[in-house]
Amino acid sequence: MSLEVLEKKVVPKIPLSKNEKKLLALVDKSEQQIIDLLQDLVKIESLNFSEFQYHKIDEIFEFTKDFMDKGGFNTTLFKAPFQSKRKDEYYYNLISFLEGEKKGKTLQFNGHLDIVPFNPENWDEDTPPLGGVIKDGKLYGRGSVDMKAGIACQMIAMKILKESRLSFKGKLQLWLVPDEETHGTYGSVFMTKNHFDIVNADATIIGEPSIRKPLTSPTIGLGEKGPHWLKFTFHGVAGHGSWPKLKSNAINKATRFIHKANRRLKIPKHKPPISKFQQLKYMLKRVTFSDLRKIRSFVPEKSPLDKDKRDSNILYKTTFSFTEINAGIKTNVIPDTCELSVDFRAMPGLSTQDLFDSIVKFCSKLKYRIELPEGYRNSQLQNTKFMKEPVDITMSIITIGEGSATDPNTEFGKTIQNSFEAIYESSPVFHFNTGFSDGGNMREAGMKDIFVFGPGGRNAHNANEYADVDTLKDVTKLYLLIAYRYLNS
Ligand SMILES: [Zn+2]
């Protein structure tokens, strides 16, 4: 089933100047270059398995450095030592820039070169994960749309600005990171901690994919929820399987927690960066009401097992999912521990301590004593009754990051808006995301004006991932026009 939606056309508030037309014409001439570069990037394996397992991905950084060097850019590879501290185990970050004639603002393009693992057996034979094969307008490969496509557009946009010899102020910078897929320890976190002055641009565009079919232009991500991945270890008493222990079996404790939490774990509400009303207004500038209804009710494929309705409030509240559970050694032994992983996604404004307070309050209701990681306040410790009880649950942190968002009404937000209108002749939809990007780490480190948008495609993190070739040229134009207008303003 396909979905036809007509996007409303608008007259751009700022029409293209002569120089801008010249720049965009250069992109038209360079379309094949963008495709070739994306194919080259897809063919270089740059796997990222886990934060804790080192995997060498030098080759793709050396390739991109070479490409930028040949283009005449000032390019440096920064080494982030891997936790093993072995001399030959490190990850690269690439910084490459072009300076204008006069001093001015810095605009930064950012992207991650790492890709998630794949199982070649699940991919169609003629479109293998490292092949970069183009079929029916789709460029296949792991990392094609997530997000080597965005990076190829950024690199070519920089090259065109340089080759055009048009004058501009300030600096256009490219920053490529090695590990967005595992939350950026050696990329966005390492660089903002150790080289903040270098990466702290006035504005940053992260080129993650964001063209959501049936729309044909990118949605502009302005913020994201904060992942709080927590592990709860339930402590119980071991015993013989033939003598049930309803209250002290660690599995029973964990399942009681799960069952009650789904209804009774109350987390404080925070104002969303974009209200429901504003989101609707953005969408209705873009499509008609009846098309919007079509988009909202469109479900591509749904398993008969899937009994969940789509939650239309997901962007406006903190959520959680139980994602891993581990317990037991043998069928006839009652387990004394059970480990449960929970994926919380926090709204901007909800601090880690606020979230932990809600969890502690909930545990107190269940009469479970919980121990928090060091450094966090635990209200149970003020209650002498609880203090005498043994610990039922030990909580530990897998990953935490706070929710964050950028105001779309800044000067840079407006440049995105008017450049978008000039390229797509329609109005941009700003959007708040549930998923993580490096933007969260950057905002947490104090960087400002960060937006996330890029080309289209499908099946990121899945078999037969592809980038839509026909979206590359216009996204490159959008990046380039934003850069030219912002750096000359
Ligand atoms: Zn990505």
Image: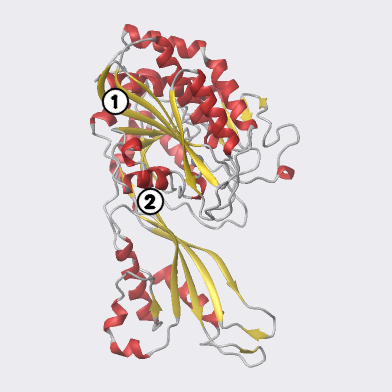
- Who's the residue at 71% across and 35% down the image? 128
Q: Quadrant of residue 458?
A: top right
Q: Farthest residue to the front: give it.
A: 87
Q: Is residue 113 visible?
A: yes
Q: Quadrant of residue 13?
A: top left
First of labels 1, 2 by sequence position: 2
Q: Assign the C terminus to one quadrant of the image.
A: top left
- Who's the residue at 51% across and 76% down the image? 254
List the residue tagged with mark 1: 415
Q: Are marks 1 and 2 in contact (CB under 8 Å)?
A: no
Q: Position of residue 36 (x, y in %)?
A: 60, 21
- Who's the residue at 61% across and 26% down the image? 40
Q: Farthest residue to the bottom: give it.
A: 243
Q: Position of residue 380 (x, y in %)?
A: 31, 80
List the residue tagged with mark 2: 225
Q: Position of residue 432 (x, y in %)?
A: 36, 43
